[in-house]
């Protein structure tokens, strides 16, 4: 079972932003920007581009709705989308509010946010979803 499957099952806590029957969105625990969110399929697939065409398309449409909610909660120029998957072997999309190109730099220092701040961010995104 991947760490993200444990999160989806509620065995590990997460700051939930959005959910439907097939996909789950929650805050990245080490955000590079306020509102940095991960979108995952509820079943385990390692590599995003191994998803079948229909599921990948549906996941992008779900991510689109999440991105709109992020932008409504945290006004930004655009919401960036990235696929890495080098750390966690459970397909996921990163959604990151952008003001400038540097906001997509995954090597930058991670934000140090309290549990209260994380819950407030997730709550604001949930309200907009
Ligand atoms: P990637 O696999 O895309 O290279 O990186 C995995 C991402 O998942 C990282 O940005 C990391 O901070 C995040 N992450 C890893 N473990 C957890 C976790 O247990 N909870 C949450 N919310 N995020 C995690």
Image (cartoon, rainbow, N blue to C red):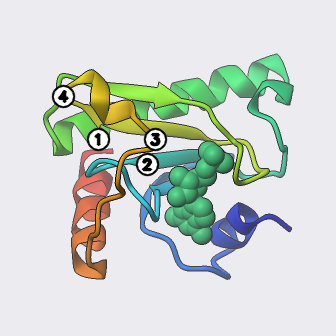
Q: Does residue 113 sit above or below 23 in this rendering?
A: below
Using a 10 Å C-alpha cutoff, classify the residue at mark 2 as few (fewer than 14 neighbours), some (14 to 19) or many (20 or more). many
Q: CA distance from mark 3 to mark 4?
A: 15 Å
Where residue 75 appears, x then y in whole percent?
13, 35
- Residue designated by label 3: 106
Q: CA distance from mark 3 to mark 1?
A: 19 Å
Disc 1 is placed on an element classified as helix
Q: Which numbered mark, 2 or 1, is in the foreground of this view?
A: 2
Where residue 10 appears, x then y in whole percent?
63, 77
Q: Earlier in the sequence, mark 4 or mark 1?
A: 1
Q: Nearer the viewer, residue 32 or 50?
A: 32
- Relative placement, left or right, of 34 versus 56 is left
Q: Earlier in the sequence, mark 3 or mark 2?
A: 2
Q: Which numbered mark, 4 or 2, is in the foreground of this view?
A: 4
Q: Does residue 117 sit above or below 73 in this rendering?
A: below
Q: CA distance from mark 2 to mark 1?
A: 8 Å
Q: Which mark is residue 37?
A: 2
Disc 3 is placed on an element classified as loop
- Residue designated by label 4: 99
Q: CA distance from mark 4 to mark 1?
A: 13 Å
Where residue 26 appears, x then y in whole percent?
48, 57
- Relative placement, left or right, of 67 versus 10 is left
Q: Which numbered mark, 4 or 1, is in the foreground of this view?
A: 4
Question: Is label 2's Cβ within 8 Å of ligand 1?
Answer: no
Identify which residue is drawn at 70% across, 52% down: 87
Disc 2 is placed on an element classified as strand
């Amino acid at each position: 079972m991947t760490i993200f499957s444990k999160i989806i099952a509620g065995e590990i806590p997460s700051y939930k932003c959005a959910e439907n029957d097939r996909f789950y969105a929650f805050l990245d625990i080490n955000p590079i920007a306020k509102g940095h969110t991960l979108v995952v399929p509820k079943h385990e697939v390692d590599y995003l581009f191994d998803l079948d065409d229909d599921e990948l398309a549906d996941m992008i449409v779900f991510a689109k709705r999440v991105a709109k909610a992020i932008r409504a909660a945290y006004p930004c120029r655009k919401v960036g989308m990235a696929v890495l998957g080098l750390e966690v072997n459970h397909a996921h999309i990163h959604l990151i509010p952008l003001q400038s190109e540097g906001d997509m730099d995954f090597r930058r220092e991670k934000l140090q946010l309290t549990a209260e701040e994380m819950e407030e961010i997730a709550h604001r995104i949930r309200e907009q979803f």
